Image (cartoon, rainbow, N blue to C red):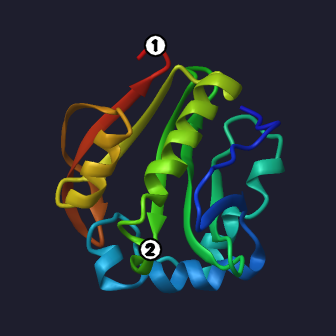
Amino acid sequence: MQFTTLPSIEHNTAYLRPLLTTDIDAWAAYLHLPAVYQHTSWNYPSSEELSAYLGNETCGEPDTRLRLAIANRADDSLVGTIGFHSVSSLNRVAELAYDLAPGYWGQGIIAVAGQALVAWAHQEVGLLRVQATILDTNLRSLRSIERLGFQREGLLRSYRQVRGTPRDFYIYAHLAAD
């Protein structure tokens, strides 16, 4: 699936842009904060691992994952990311992924960015389904995804290893037909 356009958002403190090399260390730093990683399946990613997301928005390869920076309008610093960590053009489906530095929680940034990305995925990219898997203990993310209009489809027991321990995840979906 190729991305010929990118979504944009209307938020007073944040906007979407491609990830930059200068974002990677800041991304790794907040992903390592206990308040963030305890509710995610990230395994303490290194800057080198996160760098694999650079340039994916212009890659042009089918089924390329996509991750965009959520940047602070005031100083262009990275405050979060949003995108798809898996894409299937054959099935016209992608899995939504997002994270936000704790200092920006509760400001409606994920709500605005998520709405824009999901609408763009259905309308511009042609995805029939956008899904999300969320660690069962991540109550903040569960509330966010439900506010975005995703429907809970079930519990995936021992779905992913999270730092060496099998963990349960809820699966949610947003259909173009919804």
Circle 1 sits in a helix, a strand or a loop, which is it?
loop
- Measuring from the top left, give residue 90's x and y in whole percent: 61, 21
Position of residue 113 relative to residue 121, above or below, is below
Identify residue type, mark 2.
Answer: Tyr
- Measuring from the top left, give residue 56's x and y in whole percent: 74, 53
> Which residue is the site of mark 1?
177
Q: Give neighbour class at mark 2: few <14, some 14-19, many 20+ (Cα, 10 Å).
A: some
Identify residue type, mark 1.
Answer: Ala
Q: Give neighbour class at mark 1: few <14, some 14-19, many 20+ (Cα, 10 Å).
A: few
Question: Quarter of the image holding residue 166?
Answer: bottom left
Position of residue 176 relative to residue 161, above or below, is above
Give the residue furthest to the top: 177
| Left or right, residue 143 beside residue 128 | left
- Measuring from the top left, give residue 83's x and y in whole percent: 57, 50
Q: Nearer the viewer, mark 2 or mark 1?
A: 2
| Left or right, residue 158 beside residue 174 | left
Question: Quarter of the image holding residue 86?
Answer: top right
**Disc 2/disc 1 C-alpha distance (Å):** 32 Å
Position of residue 66 relative to residue 26, above or below, is above
Q: Residue at x 66, y 79 (%)?
A: 77
Q: Residue at x 30, y 84 (%)?
A: 34
Circle 2 sits in a helix, a strand or a loop, which is it?
helix
> Which residue is the site of mark 2?
104
Q: Earlier in the sequence, mark 2 or mark 1?
A: 2
Q: Quadrant of the C terminus?
A: top left
Q: Residue at x 34, y 44 (%)?
A: 145
Task: Give the total number of marks visible in the rendering.
Answer: 2
